[in-house]
Amino acid sequence: MTTQPHTDRRVAIVTGGSRGIGQQVAQRLAADGFAVVVGYAGNKDAADDVVRTIEDTGGTSYAARADVGDESEVAALFDLAEATYGGIDVVVHAAGRMALSPFVELDLGELDALYRTNIRGTFVVDQQAARRLRPGGALVNFSTSVVGLAFPGYGAYAASKGAVEALTLILAREMRGRDVTVNAVAPGPTATELFLDGKDEETVARLAAQPPLERLGTPNDIAGVVSFLTGPDGRWINGQVLRANGGII
């Protein structure tokens, strides 16, 4: 990483920014004028590719590794963002883990790993965000529309994201007086590598047919929602879960 000087731009941290929805969010926020810290867990090459894409289009970015479940690593990520850019205005916590299995078949070790990333990770990232976001800032977490849709096989994942929604709504109220919004985005079926993995064509086609708009969402669809929530037109949206799913009920 090449250290860059402090900037007058607003500054965003995007965890899980090396792929999927997080990647598109990082690129969209850079296009919106943010200096973007691309947080990643293990795939440095992918994160560096995102940074190059941002810089090639005139943006400002760097990649930094952190395990979202490790409070020391997350604190170091926030320290580095503040030291490099002078402060933090937006945190988008897109890092997550998904394990699909019927209740009776799920390995409990996988359950523990899922909850460490999705619940503990959200708490750790949000705790740092709550301490450090500047006035006028925004925190966006990620849930899933499966919390309401209750698809079989998604029990552990949906339960973890239900916890994310609870944390989001409570933190929004605890941030009273700080001029910082706290919301969650809950995508429906979205064409990412994580979502498509292990699904046959029939399953994908069935899920794509469910919304009245009759298609899967795209990472760009979700990035647009995040752009709204973190921009000037989203300042009156606070303590909400936005179900960005094309109208699935």
Image: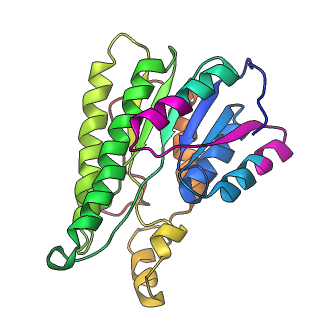
Q: Is residue 193 visible?
A: yes
> In the image, residue 236 lies at what x, y percent?
43, 24
Q: Quadrant of residue 151?
A: bottom left
Closer to the camera, 2 or 7?
2
Which residue is painted at 60% across and 32% down in the image? 12
**Position above or below: 100 against 46:** below
**Looking at the image, how many numbered discs can be counted on the residues?**
0
Which residue is painted at 76% across and 45% down in the image? 54
**Position above or below: 202 against 38:** below
Q: Is residue 191 visible?
A: no
> In the image, residue 200 lies at what x, y percent?
45, 88
95 vs 6, left or right, is left
> In the image, residue 182 lies at what x, y percent?
39, 30
Pick out the residue farthest to the left: 104
Span of residues in magenta:
52-77
**Quarter of the rendering occupied by the C terminus:** bottom left
190 vs 31, left or right, is left
Q: Quadrant of residue 121?
A: top left
**Quarter of the rendering occupied by the N terminus:** top right
